[in-house]
Structure formats: structure tokens, C-alpha cells
């Protein structure tokens, strides 16, 4: 039973590690569609800093 907590914790951390960058990519794609490629690239450059 000692392996259950690290297993659940690892799963939760992995899910967060996948979802958060995905949301940033979706935001950049939305900006690209609405405002153009240059604005999306500016957004991506600011997020990386």
C-alpha cells in the first residue's frame, strides 16, 4: 500500500504537466486566428520569459 500515494501523486503531476502547456498553446492558436500570426508570436515570446 505504500506505493499508492506516489502513484497517485505522480499521475496528478503528469496530468498538470500536460494540461498547462496545452492551454498556453490553445491561447496562442486563438490569438493567431483572431489577431494574426505576429500577435501570436509576440504572445509566445512573452510567455517564455
Image (cartoon, rainbow, N blue to C red):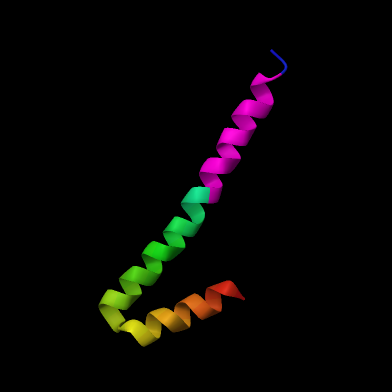
Residue 22, relative to residue 5: is it above or below?
below
Image: 3 above or below 47 = above
Picture layout, residue 16 above or below residue 22:
above
Residue 20 lies, in percent from the top left, at 50, 55
Q: Is residue 28 left or right of residue 45?
A: left
Can you give x and y, in whole percent of width and height, for residue 44 in the image? 48, 76
The residue at the far left in this view is 33
**Residue 11 occupies quadrant:** top right
**5 relative to 38, above or below:** above
Instruction: Find residue 18 and report its horizontal and vertical position in percent.
Output: 50, 49
Residue 5 falls within the magenta-colored stretch: yes
Q: Residue at horizontal 34%, vertical 75%?
A: 31
Q: Residue furthest bottom?
A: 38
- Residue drawn at (43%, 81%) of the image: 41
Q: Magenta span covers which residues?
A: 3-17
Q: Residue at x 43, y 58 (%)?
A: 23
Residue 15 x, y percent position in the rendering = 51, 42
Residue in the image at 44% along x and 57% along y: 22
Which image quadrant: the N terminus? top right
Residue farthest to the right, as pictured: 2
**Is 13 a magenta residue?**
yes
Amino acid at each position: 500500500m505504500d506505493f499508492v500515494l506516489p502513484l497517485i501523486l505522480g499521475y496528478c503531476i503528469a496530468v498538470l504537466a500536460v494540461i498547462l502547456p496545452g492551454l498556453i498553446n490553445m491561447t496562442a492558436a486563438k490569438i493567431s486566428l483572431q489577431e494574426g500570426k505576429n500577435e501570436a508570436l509576440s504572445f509566445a515570446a512573452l510567455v517564455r520569459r
